[in-house]
Image (tube, rainbow, N blue to C red):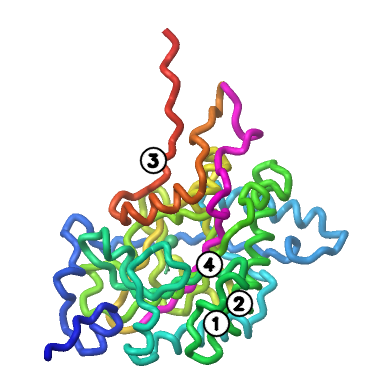
Amino acid sequence: MAAAAKMLVSDIVSGGISAVPANYVRPISDRPNLQVVHDDSTIPLIDLLPLISTFPDDRDRRRQVIRDIAHACHNYGFFQVKNHGIPETVIDNMLTVAREFFKMPEKERMKCYSEDPLKAMRLSTSFNVKTEKVSNWRDFLRLHCYPLEDYIHEWPSNPPTFREVAAEYSRRVRELAVRLLEGISESLGLEREYIVRAMGGQGQHMALNYYPPCPQPELTYGLPAHADPNAVTVLLQDQVPGLQLLKNGRWIAVHSIPNTFIVNIGDQIQVISNDRYKSALHRAVVNCSQERISIPTFYCPSPDAIIGPAPPLTDGEDHPPAYRSFKYDEYYRKFWNRGLEVETCLDKFRAIAPPPPT
Ligand code: OGA
Ligand code: NI
């Protein structure tokens, strides 16, 4: 009997390969061009202590952090954070259990496999194998994490510490995400709670991305250029480089600093901010010698939340609403169904400009 086809990149690689299989090879016009990535510019690093602590004498320092956030969100859509309030052990344990998960035997991992992007817990590969023509050099476990009690029973029970470690991690990251959304709200001149309230019951998903070493990294992507569909992403990565973001038409490598997180604005904040903040394009590239793990948390509105530009940020003349209002669920389904081929999903929700006056 012929062996079953390998679904996951990790299992294709573990057989030993010297070339990238044909279905991972990008057309020449769409390759990472690894030589022209810039290392000379980096994203802002923001010390969040004044946002996390509640000392009454920190009002001025809080104001400065809010200004730093405004600058980063407007100019980069990306920043790194330190003094974020999440203990080192929580971070280390999460990276360790993620590594352990992807080292389990194929048979054990495949119990979680699914190709349905709307499932609340699934192991999958690439981006959306059902819609895309070329696959990506990535396997991932995706989990819904908020409200935790609705989902934790679906999470993998192996490795044995998985649920406990990932639950603690997701609780901590949720606290951080809420603090960040409060800061982002204020930085737009909105009430501190505006964005969190606009997100209704809220949602939180986490991905454990596993990028195996790749024999020909110049031919393929871990993840091609995309913007995140959620509100804000809090990314933890190991020490292996791979994340890049697009700034002024140039791809910039984002280096990992131990015990920091990378924060990026997603499409929903771009909408709420009425285009003041941008949901930046970013991608992950792979390399030939080292595996890489990244763990993004996608903080998002609840599926039934109605999202649209914040009224205080729209006015008839200079800043008409750039988007129509929509249910987050509608946005999320469009994002997953279209594949990552088209670069941004936001354009599908742009307001139709009124005809020019005659
Ligand atoms: C993502 C993502 C980047 C990375 O999962 O949306 O952008 O470095 N990941 O893995
Ligand atoms: Ni992303």
Which residue in the structure is indicated by mark 3?
348
Judged from the image, the secondary structure of the residue bearing numbered disc 4 is strand
Residue 244 appears in view: yes
3D distance between C-alphas at marks 3 and 2: 34 Å
Judged from the image, the secondary structure of the residue bearing numbered disc 1 is helix
Which residue in the structure is indicated by mark 2?
169
Disc 4 residue crowd, few under 14, some 14–19, many 20+, Cα 10 Å: many
Height in image: 153 above or below 355?
below
Q: Which mark is residue 297?
A: 4
Disc 2 residue crowd, few under 14, some 14–19, many 20+, Cα 10 Å: some
- Viewer-proximal residue, 88 or 46? 88
Q: Position of residue 253 (x, y in %)?
A: 41, 65
Q: Which mark is residue 109?
A: none
Q: Amino acid at mark 1?
A: Met
Residue at 20 percent across and 89 percent down: it is: 16
Q: Is 314 inside the magenta-drawn segment?
A: yes
Quarter containing the C terminus: top left
- Magenta part of the chain: 291-316
Q: Is 18 inside the magenta-drawn segment?
A: no
3D distance between C-alphas at marks 2 and 1: 7 Å
Residue at 39 percent across and 75 percent down: it is: 123
Residue at 42 percent across and 28 percent down: it is: 352
Q: Amino acid at mark 4?
A: Thr
Image quadrant of ligand 1? bottom left
Residue at 55 percent across and 46 percent down: it is: 74
* Residue extending furthest toward the left: 1
Which residue in the structure is indicated by mark 1?
94
Residue 40 appears in view: no
